[in-house]
Amino acid sequence: MVKCIGVLTSGGDAPGMNAAVRAVARTCLNKGIKVYGVKLGYKGLHDGEFIEFDNHSTRNIINIGGTFLKSARFPEFKQEKVRQEAIEQMKKVGMEALVVIGGDGSYNGALKLTEMGINCIGIPGTIDNDIPDTDFTIGFDTALNTIVDALDKLRDTSSSHQRCTILEVMGRRCGDLAVHAGLACGAESIITSEVGFDEEELIATLKKSKASDKKHAIVVITEHITDVHALAQRVEDATGFETRANVLGHMQRGGRPSARDRVLASRMGIKAVELLIEGKGGLCVSDVKGEIVGLPIEEVLGHRRAVNQGIYDDVLKLRF
Ligand code: ADP
Ligand code: F6P
């Protein structure tokens, strides 16, 4: 059985990563497995920045946002030579296997390390919810609640000033944050890369809304689709709605993890260690209809993330 495991957080941080590290550490310690926290993602793995965890190391972190192990983007890890140097560092302390908490980029690193003889298990830690074959990623729920809070506040001022508010949210190419937040906050329009951006349709929707007794409007849009400040000007010119654009930015990545994220992170951390104990590697843990399962990273990365059409259909059912 595996005797020593490392755990790292990599890529964009996400609320709940600490809860996942805690679960990995405690599961290991309870099974008599030595466990190291690796600082700064793959960079720390390469530089040998390891902290041996004991029963005290992961106290008081389940409720803290960000990642206390710190995260990093380290493109050098794509080079086999750099990965080999990281493996040498692992060997120095007897680290035989690794849990990688991060997004799809981090999964690629985990897969390549597994191919080089180090069993790795990925845990989906990203606010974007953009990993295929898992219903939810760690951090999505907290970020969603942050957006909902922001939208509720924007609604207050938007309503007072009879304005249209456009809010750009994160998600990279995934519209889940936008569509869930839009539904939760009663947005007039939700624009994601999955549905595509039709400016004429947006303007028609807002004109219709203005022609009815609605005096303000909310539009939620995923990042990287269009310049929202320029869009706000065009919407104002075309509809007569005074319009303001807001970009929510990195505050979406911070904050106390929600209960849902802590539960998901804890369950995934346990499962990751269980898979390593079974001698498995090259897998990632996924939430499939409430069950935490291990799936091959290679297959998962080869899939396109299925769009949850149901939620888009439900948005339309509530539109006047
Ligand atoms: P995320 O994991 O959130 O998608 P990135 O795409 O930035 O974030 O990936 C995080 C890190 O994973 C990178 O900085 C790099 O160290 C490592 N990584 C990404 N892609 C690869 C790859 N193809 N091979 C090896 N390592 C990779
Ligand atoms: O993947 C998480 C995420 O926050 C995306 O939503 C966003 O596009 C990106 O990371 C921002 O990255 P950075 O922190 O490097 O600006």
Image: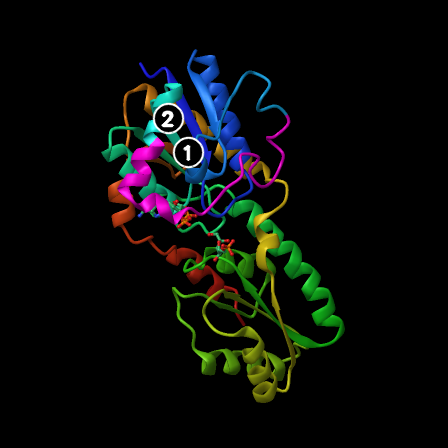
Nearer to us in this view, 264 or 116 = 116
Tell me if label 1 and label 2 are in contact, CB under 8 Å: yes
Q: Please, is residue 277 above or below residue 262 in the view?
A: above
Rendered position, 137 above or below 154: above
In this rendered view, identify the residue nearer to me: 177 or 80.
Answer: 80
**Does mark 1 have its CB less than 8 Å from ligand 1?**
no
Q: Does residue 76 appear left or right of residue 244 in this picture?
A: left
Name the disc covering residue 90, or none.
Answer: 2
Can you name the residue that lies furthest to the top here? 32
Question: Which three-letter amino acid code belongs to the residue tagged 2?
Answer: Met
How far is the residue under mark 1 from the one under mark 2?
7 Å
Give the class, few, some or many, for how many residues have Cα within 10 Å of label 1's Cα (few <14, many ≥20): many
Which corner quadrant holds the N terminus?
Answer: top left
The furthest residue to the right = 160
Q: Earlier in the sequence, mark 1 or mark 2?
A: 1
Expressed as whole percent of the image width and height from the top left, the position of residue 123 reads: 41, 36
**Can see residue 293?**
no
Whole-percent x, y for residue 133 in the image: 33, 44
Toward the viewer: 224 or 306?
224
Disc 1 marks a residue whose amino acid type is Leu
Residue, x 43% and y 25% (percent of image)? Answer: 270
Colouring used for the render: rainbow
Residue 298 falls in which quadrant of the image? Answer: top left
The residue at 37%/26% (across/down) is: 90
The residue at 65%/76% (across/down) is: 214
Element at badge 1?
helix
The magenta segment is 60-86
- Decide: few, some or many residues near mark 2? Use Cα within 10 Å; few <14, some 14-19, many ≥20: many
Query: Which image quarter holds the C terminus?
Result: bottom right
Which residue lies at the image location 40% right of the left edge and 20% below the top edge? 93
User: Circle 1 is placed at which residue position?
Assistant: 45
